[in-house]
Every structure is written in structure tokens, then in C-alpha cells.
Amino acid sequence: MRKPMIAGNWKLHKTLQEASDLISGLIPNVADNRNVEIVVAPVYTSLGKVAEAISGSNIKLAAQNCYPEPQGAFTGEVSPLLLKDVGCQYVIIGHSERRQLFGESNKLINSKAHALADVGLGIIFCIGETLEERETEQTFDVLRRQVRLGLKNLREDQMKSLVVAYEPVWAIGTGKTASDEQAQEAHAFIRALLTELYDKETAKATRILYGGSVKPGNVDSLMSQPDVDGALVGGASLKADDFARIVNFQAQDS
Ligand code: PEP
């Protein structure tokens, strides 16, 4: 019942020309895939160009961030409405790079979630523990806090357009992937938490993506885990062939 989502986070990579080349390399390689919701998140400056390129295809557009205010004296920021206007259907919030490098708090992330829900944009809500937090057995406390505060006062009906991305910080861009068991354990915990905070139906319907060094070589077994509903992919989304292989994953019988 949960349609898998594979989302590519291009981070701060690709000029306009490079973004065009990447998306035109990707479109034909995933065109036949109707079983997966495919999303790409280019940098702000490439959104318009990629939106044009994917028009009529099975690929959707996401932004990597937003500011929670609709307009005003907020130099350098971009609002949810402007992202919708350029063709985005999703926005990534709470990415660990934003939390760590730009000091984003759970409170700010929560205000972004509300601003996005208010304009009807889909949300890819990232959470995850650092290596130190994992090693000191704080993983579940951290995930609980991030989910409770990040989703505060978000209604059940608004949860329908929200996807959770579990991204252990120690696995992002490091080449170290969580084991299938570690991913499944965290995802099952998050789903149980959603049952507590909402209800069983919401928890069952909410997709939980795994992110952290997902590659063509590990996607199949990760996607075989019962609570892994997709992937948020950084590095491997920058190569059309690699990303296409991830989109066209083959879940294995476990
Ligand atoms: C990410 O940026 O969300 C990510 C998971 O990156 P990578 O796949 O490169 O680890």
C-alpha cells in the first residue's frame, strides 16, 4: 500500500548545463518505471530548468530547503509558495547538513513543515542520529525528540503528504551504510512512534525512506526490509546511470 519513493538530493552540485545533462540522461532510463515515485532535488537555480525538462515525465521536482515565511524582508530566502510556483511538489526539510552546518532547530523545522502543509506541498522530513549519539545509545531518544518536535501540531490529514527520511548522520556521504538490520530497526521504531503520536492507520500509510550512502550495490537489500519504503540518495543521484539503477531496484526476498 505504500508506493516506494526514490529521491535524489543533488545538494550544492551542478550548473544549469550539468543539471540539464543529468536530467536528460535520467528520463529515458526510468521512463518505464510506474511503481516508484521518482523525485529529484536540484539547487534552487536549476529548479526552473529541471521543471521544464521533466514536464510530462514520471519524475517529480523537490527543493532542498525553504523559509517558513510567505514573503517579506528575508534576504536570500525562498518561500514555499515560490517553490510551488516553479513546479516543486516536495521540499526536503531537516536535512542533517542544515541542522549541523546552519544550526537549524527542531522548532524552525516544525515551522517549515507547517508552512509547506499550508500551501499543499509535500514534505520530505529528515531525521537521524550522529555517530556519537548512536555509540552512547541515544539513537531512539534523538529520533523521538526530532519526530515529536518536528511534527508538532501537524494534523493527521497533513501527514498524508509527508514522507519521513531516516538518515543516520554517520552514513551520509561517508560510504558507510547502515546495515539492513539497523535501518529496519530504526524504521520500525519511527513507525511505532507515529502510531503513538497519531494512529495506526497514519503510521501504516506514512512512507519512511532510508538515506545514507545508498548505492546501486546496496539498494536491493535495503529495499527488501519491510519498513524501508524508499531512499533519499545524495552522491549516487549525481550520476544518471547509478540513480536509474537505484530507482529500478529489485527488492530481494529476505
Ligand atoms: C543525503 O544527502 O541525504 C544523503 C543520504 O547523501 P549520500 O547518499 O551521499 O550519503
Image (tube, rainbow, N blue to C red):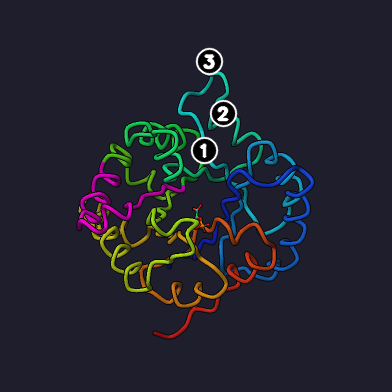
x%, y% of residue 206?
38, 57
* Residue bearing mark 3: 72
Asked which quadrant contains residue 254, the reply is bottom left
Which residue is label 2 attached to? 78
Q: Please say if 221 is above or below 46.
A: below
Q: Secondary structure at mark 3?
A: loop
Q: Position of residue 109 (x, y in %)?
A: 38, 36
Tell whether circle 3 marks a residue whose Cβ is less than 8 angstroms from ligand 1.
Answer: no
Kindly identify the amino acid type of the residue bearing the numbered disc 3. Answer: Gly
Q: Is residue 166 visible?
A: no
Cα distance in 3D space between marks 3 and 2: 10 Å
Q: CA distance from mark 1 to mark 3?
A: 17 Å
Q: Nearer the viewer, residue 73 or 206?
A: 73
Q: Secondary structure at mark 1?
A: loop
Residue 215: percent from left, percent from top:
55, 68
**Between tags 1 and 3, which lies in front?**
1
Q: Is residue 33 left or right of residue 213?
A: right
Residue at position x 47%, y 24% in the image = 69
* Magenta range: 124-148
- Left or right of 230 in this view: 197: left
Q: Is residue 29 magenta?
A: no
Is residue 139 found inside the magenta-colored segment of the image?
A: yes
User: Where does the image place residue 9, in percent across and percent down from the top left?
Assistant: 56, 51
**Amino acid at circle 1:** Asn
How busy is the neighbourhood of tag 3: few (under 14 within 10 Å), some, or many (20 plus)? few
Residue toward you, 91 or 232: 232
